[in-house]
Image (cartoon, rainbow, N blue to C red):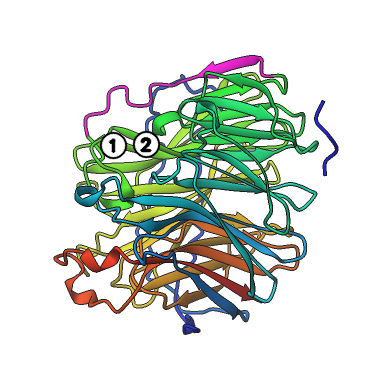
Amino acid sequence: MCPRRSPRFKLIVLALALVLIVPIFGACGGGKKEGKLPTPSTTYEKLPEPQSTITGPVEEAWIVRYAGPAEQIDELADMAVDDMGNVYATGSVTITGSVLVDKIDDKTDVDYVTIKYGADGTQEWAKRYDGNGGSIDLAKALALDNEGNVLVTGTTGTVKYDGDGNLLWSAGTELAKGMDIVVDGSDCIYVTGDAGTVKYDSAGRELWNAGGGGRVIRLDSAGHVYVGCKQDSFNVVKYSSDGDMLWSRAPDVTDNLTGTLDYWYGNVRGVLAKAIGMAVDESGNVYLGGSLATDANVADFVTMKYDVNGTQQWVDYYPGPPGRSDSGNKGSASAIMVRDSENVFVTGMNVRDDGISPYCSHYTTLRYDSDGNLGAVLLYYGEPADRWAEARAIAADASGNLYVVGKILGGFATVKYDREGTQVWASWSDVGYTDSPWVIAVDGSGNVYVAGSVPVGEYDYTNIMTDTFEHYYNNDFVIIKYTQ
């Protein structure tokens, strides 16, 4: 039994953007054959032109940066916010040497770093963890318990800090090399990575381990453990709270596919399929999201559901917005979440095929009901519309409002939708060209936090497709807080 639970950058509120709520009838329901891609059952109509009406205020409360001592690549990995509005972030910072692939040597030292900021953005502490003593330690995920302690996992183990930043314990076993981490109602800790899954009590004592690992770990209200997306595949394994495997599923979603995701959009390349995330509702239903290459140089979103017994209920894929060409349509899912056990959302991007520019895209957010019916397609173009726009993360507040963050060339762009899918506001923070942000969170007061990594210095956007990107190897963490 586990122990008791315990500076400033400009913000532009855009008068732009588009919410398209496209009703979809006859979408996929239950009873789909496992692992087989369904035949599209939707006839799409051409998109209307983007609207330009935004209501509702949003303000940037503060923005903070954090730079490692070597002024090289510092990559934020995860963030969480507690009930007091304190913000915790973790990632990896270069201490010495170079992390460029052709320059890594025995002088290269990269450590975990975990930082706490107060509700006003003041840094309270920053702690580094050197798990291998001068090697490369990459933090991957962070979780909070109810005692105000901070758990961090990554490639060289799992560590626990108290609220003042004191290191309480570390676990450096092979199974402790984590990609994701969660904490249950008794403050037991679950870590998963490609090597396996392990459960610790709150003092860091191992309770059980299992060989089935993955990139994502989730819990349901009954304490069952779900591990998925091992090596970016569409697998999922369910365990009891005692570590007994209850079922395992690994559908072959690539059956009869002819293409490959052989392009750089959305960070997928040279594969038939890529799972990007897993969500579990309170009843133990499991949802997986990702991307599929359904034809040469064509990629679609794919979403599937398993019930509590591991029976696949439905599979659906989204081939891109209406009015787009079927040839060369590129899409990439980035994140998935469940809201109130009623709706599942998948967000990402689609390349635009409207003749404006070969490097234009937009946010695409899909809303399914629990039966797999595609009820809405929410599109966000950014301003100006001839930019690269790619959604990266999604969250909901206590009222069911939806928030999507991503990058639009030159900065972070965050969009709020109400519960029905109507866009409320959009904001853009000019933090520099970036392949992040990765994380979004909303606190109990409705404040919104977005975080990622951005390069230091100016950048000539006109050379984006030809620049060598050498100056990008000086990245800082960035966290932005918005009030509304």
In the image shown, does 87 or 449 lie closer to the viewer? Answer: 87
Q: Residue at x 75, y 68 (%)?
A: 445
Q: Residues within 10 Å of mark 2 (few under 14, many from 20)?
A: many
The numbered disc on residue 293 is 1
Q: Residue at x 41, y 75 (%)?
A: 431
Q: Is residue 305 visible?
A: no
Q: Tell me the residue at 45%/43% (across/down).
A: 133
Part of the protein shown in magenta: 243-259
Q: Quadrant of the C terminus?
A: bottom right
Task: Look at discs 1 and 2 and give the one toward the viewer.
Answer: 2
| Figure disc tally | 2
Q: Does label 1 or label 2 sit earlier along the sequence?
A: 2
Distance of label 1 from label 2 (alpha carbons): 9 Å
Image coords of residue 30 (percent x, y): 56, 26
Q: Say which of 70 and 211 sits in front.
A: 70
For badge 1, the amino acid type reads: Ala
As drawn, is 275 to the left or to the right of 58? left
User: Residue under circle 2?
Assistant: 274
Q: Which mark is residue 237?
A: none
